[in-house]
Image (cartoon, rainbow, N blue to C red):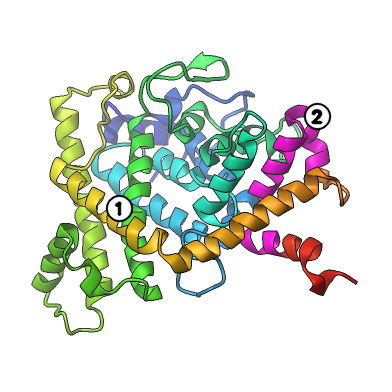
């Protein structure tokens, strides 16, 4: 039984691999804090994310299918929970720090705007008009560092540097800094775990939701090698193609086989790349946590299928176009000051400028709040 931090630190040293990040060797927080008597620094990061309003709002943000159109489709929140669960599985199997991997997974989409990638793309397009851009990973850092209001001593959540580094995914090995300090060439192994867990999670659940929606059928996807592999596993478990449980169980087998492949390939990479310390992994350009080449090819084919048949499906695109139009109209409405600016916009405009303040306000909206705001300003139903 672990009775306090010292016991947990000993547990980390005794049971985690030499290349895992340990909480007691954390690089710390922007604003120093005393240790908690029973929770490690990474556990506290996790709980700060979980208890934030921004995390709760993910329940009403689109993953692929517009929030509210069906009770069984993934939302941004259920997607995040699935990513966190798979991150823990991968981290445990590889001897990594589960708490850190889970924390990064839970925070990875906290900056996602409403209406999924359609909303993100539209905000990015808008901000290009102001010589800027919008990317949800960048906004996640701004949220946890500056905009979330909770603690009297500082703005943001004051997360550890390890968690914050994990939220910066697109570094390309050059000239990327955090707090004026250059980042390593590559992500920590725990960050890589959360990153690949994100990919394999949506590969699986977007098939599941696509089948649920009727946009695709089992016959449509049956030719893909990754589906064939998962189907064979399903059949060996005593399932049959005539069984109404068949497709859902195949999706389960598909996710399980991807997780197993990542574990096997990553363990081999750790061995052949002679990864002995966290720094070894972070100072190489090559990703350590990876699919095998065979699975990578299969996931590429699967991703192409998802784009052709779900993301670019005309029914989905029609909804996406309407949502993008609403975001642009909302942005212009706030910019033209036809309505009093919100407390949020007024508070952060001096620091970020009006255009960025409006962009960040819209990015924080849930799907339904964005629609309510749009109807309030543009629907005749609300004009009285």
Q: Which mark is residue 371?
A: none
Callout 2: few (<14), some (14-19), or many (20+) C-alpha neighbours within 10 Å? few
Label 1 crowd bin: few (<14), some (14–19), many (20+), radius 10 Å: some
Q: Main secondary structure of the magenta part?
A: helix
Q: Which residue is mark 2?
A: 350
The residue tagged with tag 1: helix, strand or loop? helix
Q: Which mark is residue 303?
A: 1
Residue 105 drawn at (x, y percent): 44, 45
- The kind of secondary structure element at disc 2 is helix
Q: Position of residue 242 (x, y in %)?
A: 17, 84
Q: Is residue 298 left or right of residue 303?
A: left
Q: Which percent across, then down, holds residue 214?
A: 37, 76
- Is the residue 83 above or below the residue 158 in the image? below
User: Of the residues under marks 2 and 1, which one precedes in the sequence?
Assistant: 1
Pick the residue in front: 174 or 196.
174
Can see residue 112?
no
User: Which of the two marks, 2 or 1, is nearer to us in this view?
Assistant: 1
């Amino acid at each position: 039984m672990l009775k306090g931090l010292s016991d947990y630190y000993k547990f980390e040293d005794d049971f985690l691999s030499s290349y895992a990040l340990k909480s007691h060797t954390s690089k710390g927080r922007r604003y120093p804090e005393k240790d908690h008597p029973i929770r490690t620094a990474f556990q506290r990061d996790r709980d700060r994310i979980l208890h934030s309003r921004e995390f709760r709002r993910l329940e009403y943000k689109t993953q692929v299918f517009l929030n509210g159109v069906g009770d069984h489709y993934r939302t941004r929140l259920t997607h995040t929970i699935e990513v966190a669960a798979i991150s823990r599985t991968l981290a445990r199997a590889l001897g990594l720090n589960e708490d850190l991997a889970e924390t990064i997974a839970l925070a990875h989409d906290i900056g996602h705007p409403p209406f999924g990638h359609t909303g993100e793309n539209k905000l990015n397009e808008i901000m290009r008009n102001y010589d800027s851009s919008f990317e949800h990973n960048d906004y996640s850092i701004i949220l946890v560092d500056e905009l979330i209001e909770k603690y009297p001593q500082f703005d943001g959540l004051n997360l550890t540097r390890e968690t914050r580094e994990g939220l910066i995914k697109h570094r390309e090995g050059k000239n990327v800094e955090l707090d004026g300090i250059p980042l390593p060439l590559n992500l920590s192994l725990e960050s890589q775990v959360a990153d690949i867990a994100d990919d394999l999670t949506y590969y699986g659940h977007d098939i599941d939701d696509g089948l649920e929606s009727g946009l695709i059928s089992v016959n449509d996807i049956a030719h893909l090698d990754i589906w064939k592999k998962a189907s064979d596993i399903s059949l060996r478990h005593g399932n049959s193609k005539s069984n109404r449980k068949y497709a859902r169980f195949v999706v389960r087998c598909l996710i399980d086989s991807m997780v197993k492949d990542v574990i096997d390939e990553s363990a081999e990479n750790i061995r052949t790349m002679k990864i002995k310390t966290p720094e070894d992994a972070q100072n190489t350009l090559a990703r350590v946590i990876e699919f095998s080449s065979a699975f990578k090819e299969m996931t590429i084919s699967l991703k192409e299928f998802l784009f052709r048949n779900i993301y670019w499906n005309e029914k989905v695109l029609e909804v996406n176009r309407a949502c993008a139009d609403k975001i642009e109209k909302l942005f212009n409405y706030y910019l033209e000051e036809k309505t009093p600016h919100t407390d949020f916009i007024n508070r952060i405009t001096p620091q970020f400028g009006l255009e960025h303040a409006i962009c960040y306000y819209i990015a924080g909206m849930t799907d339904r709040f964005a629609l309510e705001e749009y109807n309030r300003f543009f629907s005749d139903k609300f004009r009285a």
